[in-house]
């Protein structure tokens, strides 16, 4: 469980996040939506322990995240619009690199299994620079899932992808849902986000202005509400 | 494998495949040495006095090229965030990157020092081991502070200009001690006179390594 209480993050006099409160339970798939600069990535970075809150606190599985960053990072799989992959290494070498950095047991078996899961076993000796954007994104998902994370963070995973690749990812992300896993995704694609998620939160100017259940929400009403809350047409 | 060695190995393997960093460092280094060679008449006695300066000019300027690429490579490929997310202490990430940079500089020196010995006709075989020690310590200190500052400069706009601006003033103690130790060693043909400079060099290496390990976390965090 992730528990965020009265969390604020400021850079000098600028507040990227203000008084954010959120509780996320295992099995839930949250989308965080909001205009550019609303604080979505900052919130994800704080959850991923890459940034510290200026005020407030965040607990992950009862652990105060600022003090136990290394233990929390072991549970987090982060998939962003950047792949975190090295062009000059092969598919297999990239996964080996991360399995060593995470000190994983049975890395060879895990890598084989993951490559099968993301459909890249034929590409394992190819350099990442020779893979298509879609393949790189699949490998990026494989890299994040290699550690069997309890928390999966997806930061704008659809940006720069064509419709075919997006369709493939929707299928992959749906398969990520499990009762003991939390998924948090930021996206500008409201319709797709609502389709995938169980819960949503709307961020505007660093504040959560609305949260609710995604499955019970009608898209057209949500779109109108989003525009009213953020002043942005989506 | 230890995370520190894993990072260094990843950098070395990547570089082995692309050869972008090592080749540019080496070409730059060779040009510096060859151009300086044009200044002297063959067999000139001035050469021994000038060699320490030439050697360290070549090492530091070529080293900058390598240090600059170190974090640019991570940032441009979008991998820095992936590294920072790994469940290891950030000082180990720093040490891994530093080890990779140190290795590239050592490879360059293994080629450039024999080249200089032949080109300048230096008879320094009897002081070769102390010279290797001085070059090792000087390179270690330079790579230590350079790796930290490379992580800072990579997030600035004029990142390739920013590194030398930041690095040279801070690395002065290392460079001064390294040049003085090398000069004393080559001119006196014995390690005795260079010992005090070697101690200073070792001291600054330790200071820079420890400080960089402590500060790296703050450099890479928001």
Image (cartoon, rainbow, N blue to C red):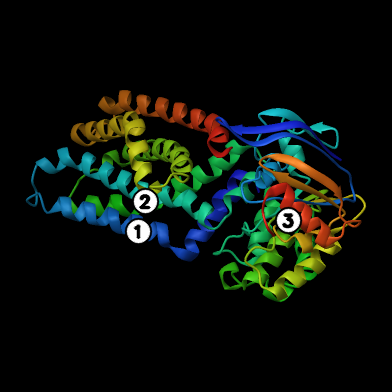
- Left or right: residue B170 compared with residue A60: left
Tell me the mark number nearer the camera, choosing from 2 and 3.
Answer: 3
Nearer to us of marks 3 and 1 is 3
Q: Quadrant of the N terminus of chain A?
A: top right
To which residue does mark 1 refer?
B24
Counting residues from the N terminus, which is met first, the one under dot 2 or under dot 1?
1
Q: Are marks 2 and 3 on the same chain?
A: no
The residue identified by callout 2 is: B65
Q: Chain of mark 2?
A: B
Residue B208 location, quadrant: top left
**Crowdedness of circle 2 by 10 Å Cα count: few (<14), some, many (20+)?**
some
Q: Mark 3: which secondary structure?
A: helix
Residue B163 x %, y %: 38, 42
* Residue nearer the viewer, B77 or B96: B77
Q: What is the CA distance from the residue labelled 2 to the residue labelled 3? A: 32 Å
Q: Are marks 2 and 1 in contact (CB under 8 Å)?
A: yes
Q: Which chain contains the residue that carries disc 3?
A: A
**Label 1 Cα neighbours within 10 Å, binned few <14 / some 14-19 / many ≥20:** few
Q: Residue at x 90, y 57 (%)?
A: A215
Q: Residue at x 54, y 64 (%)?
A: A88
For residue A144, which numbered disc appears in the image?
3
């Amino acid at each position: 469980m992730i528990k965020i209480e009265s969390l604020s993050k400021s850079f000098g006099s600028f507040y990227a996040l203000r008084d954010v409160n959120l509780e996320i339970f295992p099995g839930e798939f949250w989308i965080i939506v909001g205009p550019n600069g609303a604080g979505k990535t900052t919130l994800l970075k704080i959850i991923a322990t890459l940034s510290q809150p200026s005020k407030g606190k965040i607990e992950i599985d009862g652990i105060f995240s600022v003090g136990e960053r290394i233990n929390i990072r072991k549970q987090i799989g982060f998939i962003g619009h950047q792949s975190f992959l090295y062009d000059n290494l092969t598919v297999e070498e990239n996964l080996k690199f991360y399995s060593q950095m995470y000190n994983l047991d049975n890395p060879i078996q895990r890598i084989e299994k993951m490559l099968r899961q993301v459909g890249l076993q034929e590409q394992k000796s190819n350099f990442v620079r020779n893979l298509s954007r879609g393949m790189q994104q699949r490998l990026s998902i494989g890299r994040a899932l290699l550690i069997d994370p309890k928390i999966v963070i997806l930061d704008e995973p659809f940006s720069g992808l064509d419709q075919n690749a997006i369709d493939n990812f929707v299928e992959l992300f749906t398969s990520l849902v499990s009762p003991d896993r939390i998924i948090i995704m930021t996206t500008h694609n409201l319709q797709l986000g609502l389709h995938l998620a169980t819960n949503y939160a709307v961020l505007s100017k660093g504040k959560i202005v609305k949260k609710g259940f995604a499955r019970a929400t009608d898209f057209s009403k949500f779109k109108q509400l989003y525009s009213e809350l953020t002043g942005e047409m989506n | 494998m230890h995370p520190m060695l894993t990072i260094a190995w990843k950098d070395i393997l990547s570089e082995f495949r692309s050869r972008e960093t090592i080749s540019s460092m080496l070409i730059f280094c060779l040009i510096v040495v060859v151009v300086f060679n044009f200044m002297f008449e063959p067999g000139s006695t001035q050469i021994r006095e000038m060699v320490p300066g030439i050697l360290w000019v070549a090492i530091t300027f070529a080293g900058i090229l390598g240090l600059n690429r170190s974090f640019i490579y991570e940032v441009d490929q979008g991998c820095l965030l992936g590294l920072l997310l790994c469940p290891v202490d950030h000082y180990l990430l720093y040490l891994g990157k530093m080890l990779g940079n140190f290795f590239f500089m050592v490879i360059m020196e293994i080629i450039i020092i024999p080249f200089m010995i032949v080109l300048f006709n230096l008879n320094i075989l009897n002081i070769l081991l102390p010279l290797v020690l001085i070059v090792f310590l000087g390179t270690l200190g330079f790579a230590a502070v350079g790796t930290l500052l490379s992580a800072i400069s990579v997030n600035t706009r004029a990142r390739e200009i920013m590194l030398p601006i930041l690095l040279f003033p801070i690395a002065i103690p290392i460079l001064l001690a390294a040049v003085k130790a090398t000069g004393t060693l080559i001119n006196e043909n014995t390690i005795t006179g260079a010992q005090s400079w070697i101690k200073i060099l070792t001291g600054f290496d330790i200071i820079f390594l420890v400080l960089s390990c402590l500060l790296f976390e703050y450099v890479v965090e928001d």
